[in-house]
Image (cartoon, rainbow, N blue to C red):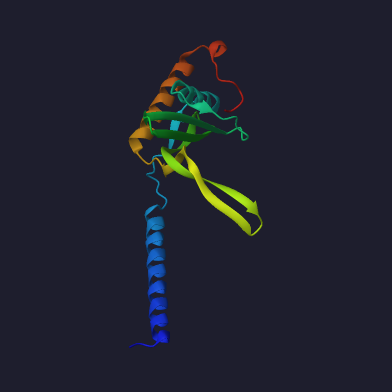
Amino acid sequence: MPSPTTVQRCVCALAVAAIAAGCASRKHDVEREGFSAAAPFSKTLAGSGDIVCWSVKRALLSQGYMLDRPSDSGVLTGTRDYQPNPKLNVTLHLQTTCADNRDGTSIVFVSASREDSRLQKMKQTTSVGVGPATLTMPSGSAKVLGVVRRETIRDPHFYDEFFNLVQRYVVDESRAPPSERHADTRRP
């Protein structure tokens, strides 16, 4: 029969091996998420910064996004919720930045994330007592929305649709006479 010290060493060695394996797999995930010039998160569009940035704002509003008031004038964020079924709520969050390249083009950066929340039962408890003499008892349950998934949207098609809509608004805005353009001089 092995001594208690030998058993402790084996358990310790197995724990260290498990932790090392977990760290190695996390490192691999980070390496796969590296930087790439082919990422779908930006596009250069023909048009001045004022027209392109205004078109980004119009694109978000036209799709039902609620816009946050930006603290940074170059950043625009929007959120849209929908419920594909009564127990699931999906929140899409877009953050955009646009900049005038000063050569007749502007670049738009966008990052979108999706958060799924599901209606879940949560047990509630009631505590009675003072100090260490506290007694906690179950007191029922409530239904609450709990986040079950959160991820950055990486689908190039999603971003292509967004950029195509922005480009359509850029074309519309560029065709309007200067006196009728809606693009304000402040960035979104």
| Residue nearest the viewer, comparing 167 with 91 | 91
Q: Residue furthest right?
A: 130
> What residue is drawn where x is 40% and y is 69%?
20
The answer to whether residue 48 is seen in the rendering is no
- Which part of the image, by quadrant, shows the N terminus? bottom left
> What residue is drawn where x is 38% and y is 27%?
164
Query: In the displayed structure, does residue 70 sit left or right of residue 82?
Result: right
| Residue nearest the viewer, comparing 52 with 13 | 13
Query: In the displayed structure, does residue 186 sit left or right of residue 80?
Result: right
> What residue is drawn where x is 41% and y is 34%?
90
Query: In the displayed structure, does residue 157 sit left or right of residue 175?
Result: left
Give residue 125's position: percent from left, percent from top: 53, 47
Numbered disc total: 0
- Which part of the image, by quadrant, shows the C terminus? top right
Give residue 52's position: percent from left, percent from top: 50, 26
Compared to residue 63, the image places residue 34 above or below, namely below
Give residue 91's position: percent from left, percent from top: 44, 34
The answer to whether residue 63 is seen in the rendering is yes
| Residue nearest the viewer, comparing 24 with 99 | 24
Query: In the displayed structure, does residue 49 sit left or right of residue 24?
Result: right
Compared to residue 83, the image places residue 172 above or below, namely above
In which quarter of the view is residue 83 placed? top left
Give residue 98's position: percent from left, percent from top: 52, 33
